[in-house]
Image (cartoon, helix red, strand yellow):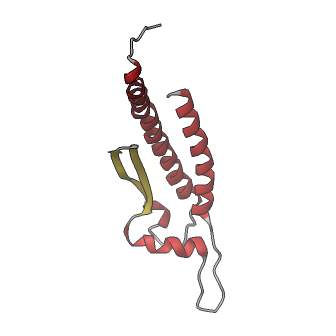
Amino acid sequence: MVDYKINPNELVETIDKVLNDYNKNIVNKAVKTETKKAMKQLVKLTKDTAPVGKRQKHYKDNITSKKHIEKERFAGLSYSEIWYVKGSDYRLTHLLEHGHMLRNGKRSKAFKFAENAYNEVEKNYIKSLTEAIENGK
């Protein structure tokens, strides 16, 4: 064990420095890696469960993600990714997810593929992020 000689006046500053270093090294790394894993899983799951119509180019082929924010802020790292649909197929997302009116006056089926995938991935993401932070990985 290392003996640190700290003045009582410097105790608060030293504790603050140690906690900030822990936040930068452990928490930020865990948030970034677990967010990337979760987004990759979300994209794969939505591609697998997205409805396939009669079109030659399928809607599910345009589902992807990208990094949205990666900034270091006062309170720590801000990192986020966005799930989206490339090209003009983004317009179909709301219609497929919630259903829509048809020409004959009936309503189309709502597939809820994105919502179901999100709910499944969110549970695993929170669990794995908590474990990563607690274990210091």
Q: Position of residue 20 (x, y in %)?
A: 40, 32
Q: To which quarter of the image does residue 8 belong?
A: top left
Residue 136: where, in percent of width, then height?
Answer: 51, 27
Q: Is residue 128 above or below residue 87?
A: above
| Viewer-closest of 8 and 47 | 8
Could you say which is closer to the camera, residue 81 or residue 130? 130
What is the quadrant of residue 33 in the picture?
Answer: top left
Which residue is at 44% across, 62% downward? 84
- Left or right: where 118 falls relative to 78: right
Q: Position of residue 34 (x, y in %)?
A: 49, 41
- Left or right of residue 20: residue 118: right
Residue, x 47% and y 7% (percent of image)?
1
The residue at 65%/76% (across/down) is 109
Give coordinates of residue 79: x percent, y percent: 40, 47
| Location of residue 102 with respect to 17 vertically, above or below | below
Q: Is residue 28 above or below residue 64?
A: above
Q: Looking at the image, which residue is at 35% across and 45% down? A: 73
Q: As rendered, which of 43 and 11 lies closer to the eye?
A: 11
